[in-house]
Image (cartoon, rainbow, N blue to C red):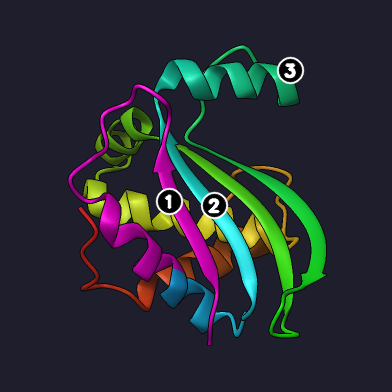
Amino acid sequence: MSNNIVVGVEEGFDAPAWLDSVAPFVQKILDRLGIENWELSVLFCSDTFIAGLNSQYRNIDAPTDVLSFEQGDEYVDESDVQWFCAGDIVISVAMIHKNAAEFGVSPNEELKRLLIHGVLHLDGMDHETNDPDQEMLQLQERILSGFPDELIL
């Protein structure tokens, strides 16, 4: 299956050493979900940057760990392949570590969880609360459990 996954960092933000490991992991998530011909981006950023987005788009004046922005456009490329522009995932690097400490998991596990979470939102899923009984969050954890040895960072 083929997808186009672009990974980057906020302008002026130092790229983490593990950045090149992100796209292959996102591809594995998409494979697990049976998704192909998607275009999506993942942007890693500071708390300040994501707080600005959170304020602008959710009226919450604080940083968050992950935001997903669905796009939903389609186009056909020069090879007559139809692509789906899924959207963008934005992740605060600082929040990866903060969440990991708060939840007693490794930063690697938390990063995988946030990437899965972002992809599920782009796939149209949502949750009303952070209650682990929410369908989306249960699926997130089932997908995560399928990647116990995947190292990103």
Q: Which mark is residue 128?
A: none
Residue at 58 percent across and 80 percent down: it is: 33
**Label 3 neighbourhood size at 10 Å, few (<14), some (14-19), many (20+)?**
few
Element carrying mark 2 = strand
Residue 105 visible in the snapshot: no
Q: Earlier in the sequence, mark 1 or mark 3?
A: 1
Residue at 36 percent across and 70 percent down: it is: 24
Residue at 33 percent across and 38 percent down: it is: 96
Q: Are marks 1 and 2 in contact (CB under 8 Å)?
A: yes
**Where is mark 2, residue-wise?**
41
Of tags 1 and 3, the one toward the viewer is 1
Residue at far top of view: 61
Element carrying mark 3 = loop
Left or right of residue 132, residue 48 in this image: left
The answer to whether residue 9 is magenta is yes
Q: Which span of residues is magenta-colored?
A: 1-26
> Which quadrant would residue 101 be assigned to in this image?
top left
Left or right of residue 70, residue 101 in this image: left
**Label 2 neighbourhood size at 10 Å, few (<14), some (14-19), many (20+)?**
some
Cα–Cα span, label 1 and label 3: 26 Å
Residue at far front of view: 78
**Where is mark 1, residue-wise?**
7
